[in-house]
Every structure is written in C-alpha cells, then in structure tokens.
Image (cartoon, grey):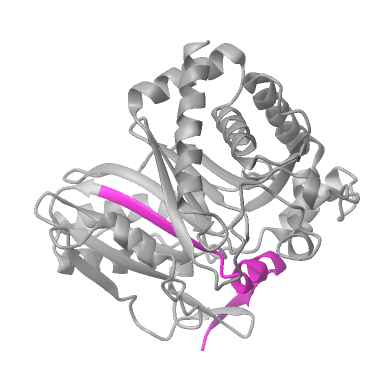
C-alpha cells in the first residue's frame, strides 16, 4: 500500500464533518460509456490525487484499479433529482475520494461528481471538469492525450505559515467578539429535533439580468460577490422577523493568489478558508452594505487575517466557538474551461457544497453569462418555503439594484 502523505488538520476537519461537494458540468455532443471510461482513466492519470483513498490519517493509493461510474439515460433520469440524491449518498473515503454519475443521450451529457472537500474546492473542480471534458473529446476523436501527471499536491499549511512569518503575524487570530444568539439575525428555524436532512434550493439569473447586475457593480465600484452578499443579507433580515440587530455572514476565500509564491489554479486540492463579516446596521442602502463587506474581505486579505483564519479553522469550525452565522457564500464568479475541445461544446457548470452545519451554504458560479446559485440547507431546520422566499427576494433586490444604477 503506497502512502502519499499525511492529511493536514484542515483536511481532517472536512473529512470529520463529511463536507462534500457536488459539481456538475454539461456538454453538447454524444459520447459512449466506453469513451467516457477512457477519458476517466486519462483524468486519473493526470491528477494522481483522484487515485487516492484515506486510511489512518494518510492519503494512500486506492485499492481499486478504476473508479466506477453510473451511466443513466437522460430520458428516464432527472438532473435535479440526481443532484438532491447526491446529498445523501454515502462516500466511503477509505475506498475512493469521489464518485461520478453521467446522464446522457444523443444530444449531449451531464456529469455529476460527488467529492470530498478535503481534496478539491470549487477552483480545483473547474480544473477537473475542464480536463475531463477535454479527455472525453480526445476519446471521441480517438486521440491519446499526452501523459502529463501532476505531482501529488502538498498541504498549503507550510505556505500559509511562511506568509504569516513574512507579515510578522502570530499563528492565532485575536479573540472573536462574543456574539449573542438572540442578537443575531438568521432565517426562521423549525421547532423540531430530527435527523439532519439536506436539500438544495437553486436560484438562476439569466444572461441579460447578469449583465445588468455587473453594470450596477461597476457603477458603484463593488464586486459581484459583495452585491450578492448584500442582497442575501437584506432578504435574510426581512425573513427573520425577530429582534436581532447583528448579521454574521461567512465567506469562502480562495487563497491561491494570496500566497507567495502563487499556487496554480490547475492544481487539484483545497486552498480556501472562511472569513466572517459582521453587519450591525442592515438599514443602510444595499450598495453601502456591499461596500462594507468588500472592504472587510479586502482588508483581511491584505493584512494577513485570512492566513490566521485558515490555521485556526480546525478550532473555529464546527466547534462550540463557532459564531451564530446566518449564511455562507462561496462565489466562483465567471467560470471558463480552458482545455481544448474540437467536437464537444461545454454548456454549463455549477456546484453545491454540503458543509454539515446548521446554516445554509450558497455556491455561486457564472457560465456563459448565466448565474446559478445552489444553496444547500438543512430541511429539518429551515422550511423549503423559507428558502424559496429567500431566492425570490434576492432576485427582486438585485433587479431593483440594477434598475437604480
């Protein structure tokens, strides 16, 4: 049994919390199961971490020669149903770190990958899907792609510690404020105590409206992430109905370009941390909230707090110290596949993350100018009607903000 390396403390948290990511890509063009199997073998040869499993706190070489996949007929299978079912599908990391379902017909196919967040964040998953579609294209053309294996990725912990040392910062951040549950705004909770059940609420904004939102962001000098976060903040406050005055949001921050030296976006592993923002005046205009959130995130990136937050992640996430967070947002922004394709035409990418926490987690991506926001939430804690109302309010707030630019 070949051992690659020991898992890091942060990777261990993702594994213990069963933090799973469902990623979806779609392409126009026909493919056979045999061609897909050839492409999957090429993918695993390119990314050795996909050939791994986890035992005794180590990444080891997987026992099985190849990862099996499930082939489904689009005519009798529903993508939305498959997405929902993936949330509750067991993933035995001692055997494999991912599974794949393919929904196909003569016009094209959808790829649904269920993977552990310990091995791939959203940036890495874009690289995986881009490469897999490229290898599918090669298989259809009967072209053998050149062997170009990545090295097995090391943990980013040493790079984070190096950056902290360069900034003369301690490993641990300062003490967090003690936020009181009654003072914090959150979505209405169901008064039940049952087994956690996850569900997905999908929000879609078409290309014309996305272009208008981008124009409004440029006009107010804010990022798309900031205005989306502000819209969710306003909608959560409207649905809360309580006396809370403070809103805590969590943002997934990719550290690849923040580390020195930079880390390639094509390297498959997880290089994100979570940053908290605090708003105690939700009555401000939406663009003022967006600017405040943007300033906070940029400040934490510039002064090195995100590195401290990364190293403190095992102590702060999923423990009694976790603050009463209302919502988590992970925003990929505009997604593009850079690998060459001559026959297949990629038509979409989106993803969803189940983080095993009581607060919902929203994963946002834009492909072909179409925005998809998949929010995974605990159906035993938050009613589906509440999540549908949240999506409607967010879309309306973004429409109003775009019209007021």
Residue furthest left in the image: 106
| Viewer-side residue, 120 vs 42 | 120
Evaluate whether residue 289 shows in this view: yes
How many discs mark residues in the rendered view?
Answer: 0
**Residue occupying image coordinates x 86% and y 42%:** 167
The answer to if 287 sits in the magenta stretch is no
Q: Please state the horizontal and vertical placement of residue 320, each as a whole percent of the image.
A: 79, 65
Q: Please state the horizontal and vertical placement of residue 314, each as a whole percent of the image.
A: 74, 64
In the drawing, does residue 65 fall left or right of residue 377?
left
| Viewer-side residue, 171 vs 292 | 292
**Residue occupying image coordinates x 64% and y 41%:** 240
Q: Please state the horizontal and vertical placement of residue 357, each as a whole percent of the image.
A: 62, 61
In the image, residue 342 above or below residue 379: above
In the image, residue 213 above or below residue 14: above
- The magenta-colored residue range is 1-26
Q: Please state the horizontal and vertical placement of residue 153, each as a whole percent of the image.
A: 57, 63
| Viewer-side residue, 75 vs 243 | 243
Which quadrant of the structure image shows residue 275?
Answer: top right
The answer to if 22 sits in the magenta stretch is yes
Evaluate whether residue 266 shows in this view: no
| Viewer-side residue, 261 vs 405 | 405
Which quadrant of the structure image shows residue 288?
Answer: top right
């Amino acid at each position: 049994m070949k051992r690659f390396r020991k898992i890091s403390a942060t990777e261990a948290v993702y594994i213990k919390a069963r933090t799973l990511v469902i990623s979806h890509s779609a392409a126009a063009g026909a493919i056979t199961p045999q061609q897909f199997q050839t492409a999957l073998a090429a993918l695993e040869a390119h990314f050795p971490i996909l050939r791994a499993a986890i035992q005794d706190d180590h990444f080891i070489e997987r026992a099985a020669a190849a990862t099996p996949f499930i082939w489904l007929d689009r005519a009798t299978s529903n993508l939305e149903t498959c997405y929902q079912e993936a949330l509750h599908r067991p993933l035995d990391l001692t055997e494999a770190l991912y599974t794949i379902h393919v929904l196909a017909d003569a016009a094209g196919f959808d790829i649904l990958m269920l993977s552990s967040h310990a091995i791939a964040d959203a940036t890495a998953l874009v690289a995986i899907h881009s490469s897999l579609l490229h290898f599918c294209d090669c298989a259809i053309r009967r072209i053998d792609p050149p062997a170009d294996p990545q090295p097995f990725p090391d943990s980013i912990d040493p790079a984070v510690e190096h950056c902290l040392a360069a900034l003369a910062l301690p490993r641990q951040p300062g003490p967090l404020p003690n936020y009181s549950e009654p003072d914090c705004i959150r979505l209405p909770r169901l008064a039940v105590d049952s087994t956690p059940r996850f569900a997905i609420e999908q929000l879609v904004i078409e290309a014309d409206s996305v272009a208008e939102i981008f124009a409004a962001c440029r006009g107010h000098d804010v990022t798309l992430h900031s205005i989306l976060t502000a819209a969710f903040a306003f909608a959560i406050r409207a649905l809360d109905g309580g006396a809370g005055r403070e809103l805590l949001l969590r943002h997934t921050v990719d550290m690849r370009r923040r580390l020195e030296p930079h880390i390639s976006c094509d390297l498959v592993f997880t290089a994100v941390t979570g940053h908290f923002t605090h708003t105690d005046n939700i009555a401000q205009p939406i663009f003022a909230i967006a600017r405040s959130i943007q300033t906070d995130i940029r400040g934490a990136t510039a002064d090195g707090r995100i590195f401290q937050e990364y190293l403190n992640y095992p102590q702060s996430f999923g423990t009694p110290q976790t603050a009463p967070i209302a919502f988590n947002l992970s925003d990929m922004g505009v997604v593009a596949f850079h690998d060459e394709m001559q026959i297949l035409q990629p038509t979409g990418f989106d993803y969803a993350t189940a983080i095993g926490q009581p607060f919902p987690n929203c994963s946002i991506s834009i492909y072909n100018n179409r925005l998809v926001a998949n929010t995974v939430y605990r159906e035993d804690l938050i009613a589906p009607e509440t999540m549908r109302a949240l999506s409607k309010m967010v879309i309306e707030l973004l429409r109003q903000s775009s019209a007021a630019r």
